[in-house]
Structure formats: structure tokens, C-alpha cells
Image (cartoon, coloured by chain):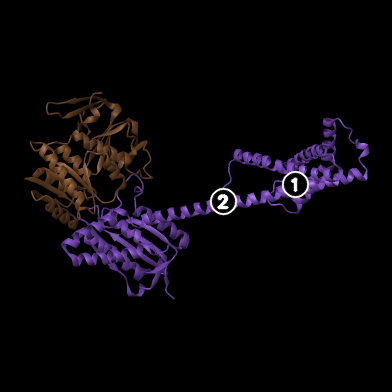
Chain colours: A brown, B purple
Amino acid sequence: MTRALIAEDEPILAATLARTLQGLWPGLDIVATAPNGVVAVEQALALRPDVLFLDIRMPGQSGLEVAEELAERWDGPAPFPHIVFVTAFDDYAVQAFEHAAFDYVLKPVSSARLGKTVERLRGALETRTALAPDALGQLLGQLQALAPRAASSERLTTIRAAVGNAVRMIPVPDVVYFQAIDKYVNVVTADAEALIRVPLKELLPQLDSAQFRQVSRSTVVNMGCVTSAVRDDLGKVMLTLRGRPEKPRVSPVYAHLFRQM
Amino acid sequence: MASISPPIHQQRRARLRRVLTDFPLSIGISALLACFISLVTGRFLENMLVSVLIGIVAFTIVYGGRLLFIKRLVWRLREWAMFAALAVLAAPVAHFTGLYTAGLLLGIRTPTLAEYPSADRISMIVFTFLGTTLMVVLIRNRERMRRAQEEQAEAHLRAQIIERQALQAQLRLLQAQIEPHMLFNTLANLQGLIALDPARASDMLDQLIQYLRATLSVSRSETTTLEQEFAAMGAYLGLMGVRMGERLRYRLELPPALRSARLPTMLLQPLVENAIVHGVEPKIDGGEITISAAIEGDSLVLDVRDTGLGLGPGLGQAPARRGGGVGVATSRERLEALYGERASMTLNPAQPQGTLARLTLPLEFDE
């Protein structure tokens, strides 16, 4: 029996999706409905469903962030679940999905459209075609490129970090990597570290995307400082950085950035 | 308003085209006059050549003078006087030069300058003058018609541009007012409720209608009463309440004495939507929204308080957000335009959490 998880913050929509799915796919077992992104990740890791229906706009974590975190934390024998994104009108996101390997349905969900998705899912589950994590990385990259840039988010040239009573000015090109810690970001240069109170999500659009790349949910590295990427026996990729001893892990979602040419 | 004049090289080309079409007209007039003279004197070919040559010279002088000196599009007395002076000057010069050239070409003797002041010659000059005048009047007429056509086309184009701009502005306004995301999510809920709980679906539809009516039908210049505005906000929060379930709690506090207070439409709504979209909706536990009205001195104070995510540290101001952000910015501009210093809009962190948005504006009542 195929097991599914629905992540949707609006209770009526979650109930409606579950109902419609059960009508279209009697053999589907909906093992849980998560009211936000954070719960969705925990339940997906605990229950290991075959299919995930992820609402994109959810409190706590967006559906895309849920997918990203799951790709990073998924382990064990269960194959990575098939993901169907669910979204209300969102022009740029839909544009990205047009080219992505992921299925998506628009709210209000039409039963005919959902029927097609169900067919596709059944086919994929039968032939056991698993999605490479790369596909998610590509989708996220596309979304980032298409996301409407806020007017105020011009490119950042200097990081202003409070250190005691002083404010340190750190030129952005000097930064080796940014590490998210809760709501803070640790700014790491070759010889110092400083905490700033800006979420990584907000910082990222203001950095030069050619130079600074996200390599996992919590880490953004300066590509100019990466000297090598090593794949261990388990297939996990680690980076060696110029001037720093730490070896940040690369999420499978972003591993394609460090493949040989 | 920006004028719609073509670039200079196009203007030049248009002018050249005009000269090329006007020139045959003047030759035609010359030929006509030649025929007329031939009827009286005979010698048709000779007259034709003389007349055409005179026509060419007159045309060159008058047209050249016009292009050089008369820039105005609309001819008034001054322009006509200037033209008359040109024609008076052109007539003897054109007549003499034309006749002289024809004489050279045909190998016949033509009158010298000394022979000119005779009644015969002067009458011919007057004749040339009349011909030149006829030419200019015809050309002028043709030009006026052409200009009228151009103006009509230009007015048409301008009207189209204005219409398009107005449409775009309206569209932007609508998008700022009703976020498509909100609308589609609400419809999705409605679709679900129709199957799950038809009675609640019907209630929700009522609220959606009330909200859409309040939001879409108002013109920006109009004012509304606080009672109506609070009812619209009640409908909006009702919709969001169905969607968000237990995550949203809300209160509307309108003192009876303020029910008939007047305020511009669409000022309060962006603040309430902001409180939902950026405050309570993205927060896992949700929160509470309180909308209240009060009198302070001779001002009306409207508060929208939420216990949501709050303004956040950010890297400076909060990023320009879709929907609500645009709404708040336009509300602020409108306040400024309507009341100047007498009104204000502030966004501050609320205690212990969330955001307090405050609108202060002059207190006005229904007549």
C-alpha cells in the first residue's frame, strides 16, 4: 500500500485534498497531515511515506524548504519520497515548475488535474523511478533566479557585525562562508568570526550568486575559497576551504555543484 | 504631457517629401498660365517654357523663404505679410530670370533690365505675382489638410496611450488590493467547504462577496464611514478565520460614537492585510489581531495590533513585500497627499510581541 503525507496549513484544504485523493486513489493511505513545515519534516522522517504533498506557502518552513531539509536528512533504506507541490497562484514559482522534474498542482485543486498526478505517481512507484536529489537542487536554483528581487535588497558589499560595543565592517569578498545558527548567521573570514542577526534566507538574495553558493540549508560558501570537494564512502561530499580548518558538508541537493567537468 | 513628435531625421524626410509633391503643383499652375497666355498671344511652346521656368524660380524663392523664415505652423497676419513680401520680391526676379533663361535656351532676344519699367512688362510681373499667390494658397491649403489629418492621428494615438496608462494603473491598484494568492486560497477553501459543510460554505461566500464589494467597488477619491470599513475588515478577517482555523483570533473594537466618522477608503485595509500576511499567517502558532478606533484631541486614531512575527531585525527596512507592502506604501502616499502634516502612519513593534500599526488622521463626521 502506498503511504502519503499531506503538509497544508489550512485545515479545510488539507481535509479536501485528502478526500479528493482517497476518491481518486482508494489504495492510498494518508498516514498524516502536517499543519506546518516543521511538523511536516519531523513526521516525514518518522513515518517515511512514499509520497509527499507539500503546500508551498506554510508557516515555519515553506514546502520547498521542507523538501530541501528532507533531502539533507533522509537516510536509511526507504527511498526518497515522490514530491508533489501544491500552490495557489504564484506566477514565478509556477514558471519554475514548468521546467522541473517535480509535479505540482494549483489550488483550488481540480479533480481531473489531480487524477493525472495520481496516474503519474502510480507509474513512477511501479517502475521505482526515484528522483535524483539534483532535480531539487535545479528547481531551487531556478526559483532563486526567478524570485522577484526586493527593491531594497541591493547587492551587499560590507557586512556590519556588532562585536561588543563596536561594529566591525567585513568586506563581503573576505567572507569564506556563512553559517546559519537559529535566527543568526555566523560570518566566517580567514581570521575571524562574527554573528549577525539576519536570517540566511534574507542574506542570500543580496549576495553575488556567482561567488556565493548555498551548499546546504545552513551553509553558503565563497566558491573562490573552495580548494577541493571530497566524497566519502557513504557518498557524502565535504569541502576543504582556503584559510579555514572546518570542512562543511554539501547537501545532496547541491552536490552537482562539485561534480567533475 | 510628452509631445509625440517624430525624430529630426524623420521630420527632414517628411519636409523633402512635401517639397517633391508641392513642386509639380506649381509647375501645373505655370503650365495653366502658359496656356492662358497662349490663347491671347499664340506661340504656345515658347510661352510654356518661359512660364515653367518662371514658375520654377518663383517656387524656389517662395518655398525656400518659407522654409527659412516662416516656422509657424499656424499662419497669422504676420506670416501672411511675410509671405506677401516674399511673393512681391519673387515676382519680378522670377519673371526676369525665367524669361532671360528661356531667351538663352531658345536663342531669342528678351527684354533687358532697362526695358522693364514698361506697362507691358509690369503687367506681366503682376501676372506672375498672381500666379505665385495662387501657387502658395493652394500649397498652403493642401498643407493644412495634411496637418489636420496628422493631428487627428496624433490625438488618436495619445488617447490610446492615456487609456493604456489608466488601465495599467488600475490593474496595479487591483493587484495591490487583492493578492491573487489570497483569492485563490479562499476559493480553494470554498470549494472544499461546499463538499464538507455547505452551510459554512454559504456563509463564507457571503463574506467573500462583502469583502470583494468593499475592496473592488470603491473609487480611490471616495470616503467611507468607519462602520462600513470595520464591516469590510470583519468580512476579511472572517474569511481568514475560516482558512486559518484556530490559528487566527481577532477582535474589532469600534466605539458607537465613532461609527459615522469618515475616512478615505482603502487606508485601513492594507494594514490589516499586512498584519495577517506578514504577522499572523507565517507564524506557526498564529496569533490575535485587534482593530480599534479612538479619539485623541481632534484626531481619529486607528490601531491594528497583531501578535504575529513582528517586524524582525532585517538588514535595514523590511524588504518590499508584495500585496500588503505596496498597499501600505500607497496608503502612506495618499495620506500625505490628502492631509499633509495632519495625518501619519506608523509601524512599531508591539509588546510583548508582534506589530502595532497606527493611523492618525483628522476627525471628520458625516453631515
Q: Image quarter for residue A176?
A: top left
Which percent across, then down, holds residue B139?
71, 47
Is residue B259 toward the left or the right of residue B67 in the image?
left
For the N terminus of chain A, which image quadrant?
A: top left
Q: Nearer the viewer, residue B27 or A202?
A: B27
Query: Chain ID for label 2?
Result: B
How many labels sit on residues? 2
For the C terminus of chain A, which image quadrant?
A: top left
Label ID, residue B135 = 1
Q: Image quarter for residue A233?
A: top left
Q: Nearer the viewer, residue B98 or B366?
A: B98
Q: How far separated are the C-alphas under marks 1 and 2?
A: 27 Å
Label ID, residue A27 = none
Q: Residues within 10 Å of mark 1 (few under 14, many from 20)?
A: many
> Visible in this render: residue B313?
no
**Residue at 81 percent of width and 48 percent of height:** B130
Q: Image quarter for residue A188?
A: top left
Vertical side of A224 occupied by A141: above or below: below
Mark closest to the chain's N terminus, 1 or 2:
1
Which percent across, then down, holds residue A191?
28, 29
Disc 2 target residue:
B153
**Residue at 9 percent of width and 51 percent of height:** A26
Vertical side of B276 occupied by A146: above or below: above
Q: In the image, what residue type sits under mark 1?
A: Met
Give the SS element for disc 2: helix
> Visible in this render: residue A140?
yes
Vertical side of B51 occupied by B152: above or below: below
